Amino acid sequence: MAAPSQPPAGTPMTGADILVESLIRHGVEVVFAYPGGASMPIHQSLTKVEDRLRTILPRHEQGGGFMAHGYARTTGKAGVCFSTSGPGATNFVTCIADAKMDSVPLVFITGQVSTTVLGNDAFQETPMVEICRGITKHHYLLTRVEDVARVVKEAFHIATTGRPGPVLIDICKDVQVKSTVPDWDGPMDLPGYRPFRKPTRAELEPIVAAIRASKRPFIYAGGGITHAGASAELRELAELTGIPVGLTVHGLGNFPADHYLCLQMLGMHGTVYSNYAINDADLLIALGVRFDDRVTGKLTEFVKHGKIVHVDIDRSEIHKNKFAHVPVHGDVKAALATLNGMLKEDANADLVAGGRYPDWWRQIDAWREADPMRCPERPDAIIPQHAIRRLWEILRDRGQLDKTIITTGVGQHQMWAAQFFGFNQPRKWITSGGLGTMGFGLPAALGCKVAHPDNLVIDIDGDGSFLMNVQELATAFAEKIPAKVLLLNNQHLGMVMQWEDRFFGSNRGHTYLGAGDDQPPYPDFCTIAKGFGVATRSVIDKADLDAALIEMIESEGPFLLNVHVPHQEHVLPMIPAGMTVHDIIKT
């Protein structure tokens, strides 16, 4: 049945209809929504606009939230998801916290009990604004239908400008059914919110001076480069100056992994040579980063003898963890564009002539040669690192890397993917970094695939993480979303087990996920996948791996490849938490 036409201007509309129409007017093309009693009017409104707005039904609210993550992280646009009140809304809390930690633009819309019973512990009432106050960029409790259009307008503005982040709209049920004439162009009410700032030339001149004085500079680039769309400017800066680049887990892809200047990922599980270089640098140019503990280790020892330049759109991040000798508050893309222009001026020709740091690069190349990233081999088993590297090699040889998006769960498989799958473009690597949420990979992959139907989307996952949102295989099948899963199944909570091996004498504190040594691998993921209607294959022998990977890549629908891997492997190198590069574990 054709969707009803839009009502003429001046016609009263219900709050639910205003909400849905506002989303469409803000360019929303898809929402991830699970209905319930307090959000039923919204879902009725969604049925009226099926020709203009796709609604995807997840099988759990957290699944829907992470689908919105995948959509937002790969597009840069605000992802949108809905839930009902009470338990439906609280199932969003982890997704909201994840978005806050990783600076993801998301609009979470939750139904709420009617205004007449607010605060009375009504059925399925939870105070979502109070619960989420510390994990949102902003939040609203909508108690007036007249405010709906303005609040949606503000929510999208806040979520996508400055440092992106999640915005919560908690809308009472009676507001959804009341009517008013909407004011689509009403002014926003955001006093004091000034998300746009372009650094001045005077603020950037100390960076040029610091580069001129440096003999061992290092660029430390993070997720802020992605959010600002500044990967081209980052590359230009590095190539102009010949300065090495190290990337955070969210910075991967913003500088080509195969570029000579790229030292890959730094931090706890970063390359040895990247961590050595940042430790010995006399100048650290930090761009769109927050000096996270997984990068810095022991803060007092991190870049102890170097000068720090810190460029960030979020003023609160500057000096928060490390003092910046040259603080620059502003958009990193604008800052780099201006800085690169300054470097190309005649007065700075000495900085871009090339060959400025011969001793520094000789040292870095010696570190790279001595401690390259190694992929161990076992003839009798499929090593997880080998499976990931073969996936990358097959896609490279098929010319598919530039149109492949990788998501992950959280754990060993996540770090191995970061280490052994090379990314040359931003927004092709989607993972939960700051919060480290297991169960992220599958639903995020579905959101990525919805946003980019012409891309191959593969969730590299572990059995522990995958099981946490395995129900979203139903969404993949029913909604015809052909995302793939490369499941590295070691029957353990691998990263926790690794820490048990390293720091607790291998005493197993409930990290084994199987059914017993005398039982086959448990659960039977292939049978589960078949129950959801998803094609699947299980692999044990190394000789069968390549063919299975190709079958997964070429499958037309969603596909689960269950690869059995040994649990004894550790993610190396490793700098133990709170330690320094001098404590790095290589073997």
Image: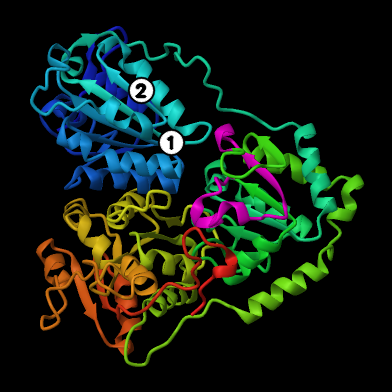
Quarter of the figure with residue 33: top left
Query: Residue 224, image x and y in percent?
Result: 55, 44
338 to 466, vertically: above or below: above
Which amino acid lies under the numbered mark 2 shown in the image of this protein?
Answer: Val
Query: Residue 542, image x and y in percent?
Result: 32, 87
Query: Residue 335, image x and y in percent?
Result: 69, 39
Given residues 566 and 168, the one toward you in this image is 566
Residue at the image position 53 percent from the left and 17 percent from the top? 192
Look at the image and tell me in which quarter the N terminus lies.
Answer: top left
Q: Is residue 257 visible?
A: no
Residue at the image position 24 percent from the left and 22 percent from the top? 171
Q: Is residue 299 magenta?
A: yes
Cα–Cα gap, marks 1 and 2? 15 Å
Given residues 36 and 122, the one toward you in this image is 122
Outermost residue on the right side: it is: 347
Q: Which mark is residue 184?
A: none
Residue at the image position 73 percent from the left and 59 percent from the top? 243
Identify the secondary structure beneath mark 2. Answer: helix
Q: Magenta stretch?
A: 288-317
Instruction: Tell which tag, 1 or 2, sits nearer the viewer.
Output: 1
Which amino acid lies under the numbered mark 1 shown in the image of this protein?
Answer: Gly
Q: Is residue 81 visible?
A: yes
- Determine whether, in the image, residue 305 is placed left or right of residue 487: right
- The residue tagged 1 is 165
- Determine whether, in the image, residue 279 is placed left or right of residue 568: right
- The residue tagged 2 is 152
Q: Is residue 261 magenta?
A: no
Tell me the crowding category of disc 2: few under 14, some 14 to 19, or many 20 or more residues within 10 angstroms, Cα based: many
Query: Residue 169, image x and y in percent?
Result: 30, 26
